[in-house]
Image (cartoon, rainbow, N blue to C red):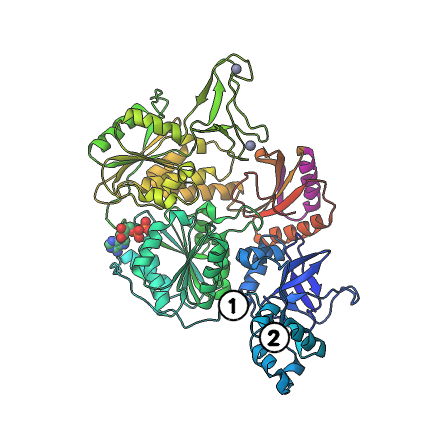
């Protein structure tokens, strides 16, 4: 009897008899099974002696799809642990861990044939050709046999006589491990490490072969990447593979380039932009050991690796490591689980570590390694505030002092980086007469005005529409864009600084794949303005930038999300890190209406560590995450009543379970694409009571009848309270 994980929203395994006439498949193999009237692709978790299902009701699996399990024992155990941790049905977690090409059940399976036991023992000369053709291999289809001279009628006869039987189709001949990767030295020599860097490399290097987590906190330009490269080299020297996780592949071209220049070894890239076949190739190359280095985004954490030796997570604080649908996992945290499971060191690097990771290093769970100096020996510039209440007249979103500072830098033939976290032309369209605003009919959100057709766009549901000709509120007033998005800024800047090249970098400008190209187009020197969103702040070196400015810091200051201050602090430090990385010293300017806000005071006067410590102490004192462990039970439904009633009943079930409960509360926005999103928050100072309460709660909710249209999901270690996560899982 086989215990099988299936991709259905039920947190349990399912029992099946092995498919008739084949050897019992090993755990980690894919199995095609009947499920109701459908066929599903399951993963064998274990084989067991008996079943609680009465023998007469136990169904037989249809076929085994693999000659060798797709999950090795460690990876299988990791996925099951991840499923438990994130309260996800085991079959869903295992499916998430597989490349899409391996997830599909075979709807029309081509039958394959092989010699039966009798056929193998048979010695009759009349069937010698049959034995020769079918003698080796996992099986051949009827057409492959016909091509080798065994006609369909002969096949039929041989089957009827019992010489030939149908074989489980080995869909994909899985690669077996090849020789260890050799250390191929690239064109670029490693740099001589500074003392701080050498200490970091030594510390992690000593942990090879053991599990230990390290947090590498180093200001931008302090040489973190160089530390990664030295450690990757150390792994390759030992014949081991290195797994490098990055938040977004489009933001990692410089890291990739340096890896390629440093090592002449096969490198596998794994990210969502790949086609299914490429993804599979990457998976296979990593699994066989052929790829010495695997670089990828969060899902790459599930890549099978023949000889994993080291895991690096770059920009570990980045929210992109968290998956937002289905299995709501954090690639970073799963990387740590995996390192533990496989007994390898894991290195989390950032200029602005997350509060969780700093807390873990405070608790000695992670060992903190610090790089305090920039490699070019210039301290990062201290940001200066521009008080917008004293400079109310803005041109193109820029105050007079900022305009002057930009002008000076351009005159010196240097580059300016302007950061505005708002894409589009203007955040909203307003009536000047009655105050009407363009709102999305399906969301609690304003429509954003974009340049080009159709104009109005909802950033929450993707709805697009033409702006109304006349104000729908009063019928008379003129409609005007209100506020600035990057597109409008760009236009204003062209007026302010005629003839200066402007590079706008945001999701609209790049599309999905064009990031690298767009960033690549920025000249290494010469006056120009780089204008953009988040994308521009992350991890890139712009050697000629000597002024970085944040046009509007205030949207993050008064955001209801409990993590917004942490995020804003990280962003400001990242933006500041873009200025003056090479020969010239840099300046950083931040426009705000609230220069007295404590965030600026601690962050700019005492630095990121002090700022983070302050936030941590505050969360400790107030009993809020990350000092507390938190999970959200999220629900979405066609009406607010249905969603909140469900969460209230969940709250009743959870009451007395040893966790602090908050809610139901509305997500942000509460209404998205016509559905109402709410959550119940569960918090505990210890992980175990939270996990066991959640497990119990999910089991109970799963058994309850779900109101029509309601969906729910548990979100462990949430990134925030934004609406989402709910729609993919029943
Ligand atoms: P980070 O990843 O922390 O931003 P990098 O590793 O990219 O820092 O290093 C920043 C710059 O400093 C790069 O141009 C790199 O070549 C240089 N650098 C790093 N380490 C050293 C070193 N030990 N000696 C000289 N230059 C270094
Ligand atoms: Zn009006
Ligand atoms: Zn909308």
Asked if residue 689 lies left or right of residue 425, the reply is right
Closest to the observer, 249 or 705: 249
The residue that appears at 45% across and 41% down in the rendered structure is: 615
Give, as a single range, the part of the protein colored magenta: 641-664
Closest to the observer, 361 or 200: 200
Tell me the element at label 1.
loop
Tell me the tag on residue 174: 1
Image spot of residue 149 (x, y percent): 58, 75
Q: Quadrant of residue 155?
A: bottom right
Closest to the observer, 550 or 521: 521
Residue 565 part of the magenta segment = no
Q: Residues within 10 Å of mark 2 (few under 14, many from 20)?
A: some
Tell me the element at label 2.
loop
How many marks on residues?
2
Residue receiving disc 2: 150
The residue that appears at 70% across and 48% down in the rendered structure is: 701
Image spot of residue 57 (x, y percent): 78, 63
Image spot of residue 208 (x, y percent): 40, 67
Q: Is residue 241 above or below residue 332?
A: below
Q: Is mark 2 within 8 Å of ligand 3?
A: no
Is residue 572 at all visible to an observer of this figure?
yes
> For the N terminus, which image quadrant?
bottom right
Which is more foreground, mark 1 or mark 2? 2
Is residue 401 at all visible to an observer of this figure?
no
Q: Quadrant of residue 367?
A: bottom left
Q: Is residue 516 above or below residue 676?
A: below
Image spot of residue 712 (x, y percent): 64, 44
Closest to the observer, 556 or 621: 556
Q: Residues within 10 Å of mark 1 (few under 14, many from 20)?
A: some
Query: In the rendered structure, are the residues bearing label 1 and label 2 in contact, judged by CB atoms less than 8 Å apart?
Result: no
Asked if residue 203 lies left or right of residue 48, the reply is left
Residue 660 part of the magenta segment = yes
């Amino acid at each position: 009897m086989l215990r099988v994980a299936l991709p259905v929203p039920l947190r349990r395994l399912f029992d099946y008899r092995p498919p008739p006439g084949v050897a019992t498949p090993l755990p980690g193999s894919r199995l095609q099974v009947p499920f109701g009237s459908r066929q599903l692709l399951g993963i064998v978790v274990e084989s067991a002696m008996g079943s609680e299902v009465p023998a007469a009701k136990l169904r037989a699996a249809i076929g085994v799809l693999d000659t060798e399990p797709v999950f090795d024992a460690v990876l299988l155990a990791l996925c099951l642990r991840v499923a438990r941790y994130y309260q996800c049905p085991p079959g869903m977690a295992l499916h998430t861990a597989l490349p899409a090409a391996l997830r599909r059940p075979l709807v029309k399976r081509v039958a394959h044939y092989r010699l039966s036991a009798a056929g193998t023992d048979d010695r009759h000369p009349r069937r010698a050709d049959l034995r020769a053709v079918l003698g080796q291999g996992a099986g051949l289809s009827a057409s492959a046999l016909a091509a080798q001279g065994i006609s369909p009628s002969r096949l039929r006869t041989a089957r009827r006589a019992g010489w030939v039987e149908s074989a489980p189709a080995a869909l994909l001949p899985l690669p077996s491990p090849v020789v260890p990767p050799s250390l191929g030295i690239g064109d670029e020599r490693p740099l001589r490490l500074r003392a701080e860097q050498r200490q970091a490399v030594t510390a992690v290097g000593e942990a090879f072969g053991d599990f230990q987590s390290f947090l590498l906190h180093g200001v931008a330009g302090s040489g973190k990447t160089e530390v990664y490269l030295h450690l990757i080299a150390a792994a390759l020297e030992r014949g081991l593979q290195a797994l490098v996780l990055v938040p977004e592949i489009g933001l990692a071209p410089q890291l990739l380039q340096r890896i390629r220049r440093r090592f002449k070894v096969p490198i596998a890239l794994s990210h969502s932009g790949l086609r299914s076949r490429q993804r599979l190739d990457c998976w296979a190359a990593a699994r066989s050991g052929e790829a010495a280095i695997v670089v990828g985004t969060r899902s790459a954490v599930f890549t099978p690796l023949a000889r994993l030796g080291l895991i690096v997570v770059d920009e570990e604080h980045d929210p992109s490591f968290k998956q937002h649908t289905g299995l709501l996992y954090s690639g970073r945290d799963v990387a740590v689980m995996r390192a533990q499971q496989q007994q390898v060191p894991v290195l989390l690097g950032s200029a602005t570590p997350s509060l969780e990771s700093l807390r873990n290093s405070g608790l000695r769970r992670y060992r903190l390694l610090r790089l305090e100096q920039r490699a070019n020996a210039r301290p990062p510039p201290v940001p200066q505030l521009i008080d917008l209440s004293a400079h109310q007249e803005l041109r193109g979103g820029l105050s007079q002092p900022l305009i002057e500072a930009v002008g000076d830098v351009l005159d010196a033939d240097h580059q300016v980086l302007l950061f505005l976290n708002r894409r589009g032309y203007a955040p909203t369209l307003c009536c000047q007469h009655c105050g009407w605003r363009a709102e999305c009919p399906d969301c609690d959100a304003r429509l954003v005005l974009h340049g080009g057709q159709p104009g109005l766009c909802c950033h929450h549901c993707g709805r697009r529409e033409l702006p109304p000709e006349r104000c729908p509120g009063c019928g008379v007033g003129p409609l005007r864009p209100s506020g600035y998005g990057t597109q409008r800024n760009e236009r204003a800047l062209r007026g302010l600084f005629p003839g200066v090249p402007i590079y706008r970098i945001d999701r609209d400008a790049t599309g999905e794949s064009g990031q690298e190209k767009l960033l690549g187009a920025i000249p290494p020197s010469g006056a120009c303005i780089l204008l953009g969103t988040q994308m521009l702040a992350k991890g890139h070196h712009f050697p000629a930038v000597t002024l970085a400015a944040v046009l509007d810091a205030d949207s993050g200051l008064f955001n209801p999300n409990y993590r917004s201050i942490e995020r804003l602090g990280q962003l400001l430090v990242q933006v500041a890190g873009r200025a003056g990385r090479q020969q010239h010293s840099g300046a950083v300017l931040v426009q705000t209406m609230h220069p007295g806000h404590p965030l600026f005071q601690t962050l700019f006067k005492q630095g990121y560590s002090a700022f983070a410590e302050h936030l941590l102490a505050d969360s400790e004192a107030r009993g809020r995450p990350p000092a507390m462990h938190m999970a959200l039970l999220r629900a979405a439904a066609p009406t607010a009543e249905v969603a909140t009633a469900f969460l209230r009943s969940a709250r009743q079930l959870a009451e007395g379970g040893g966790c602090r409960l908050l809610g139901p509360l509305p997500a942000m926005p509460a209404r998205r694409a016509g559905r109402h999103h709410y959550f119940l928050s569960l918090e505990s100072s210890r992980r175990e009571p939270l996990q066991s309460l959640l497990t119990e709660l999910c089991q109970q909710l799963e058994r309850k009848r779900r109101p029509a249209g309601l969906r729910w999901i548990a979100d462990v270690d949430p990134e925030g309270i934004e609406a989402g996560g709910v729609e993919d899982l029943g």
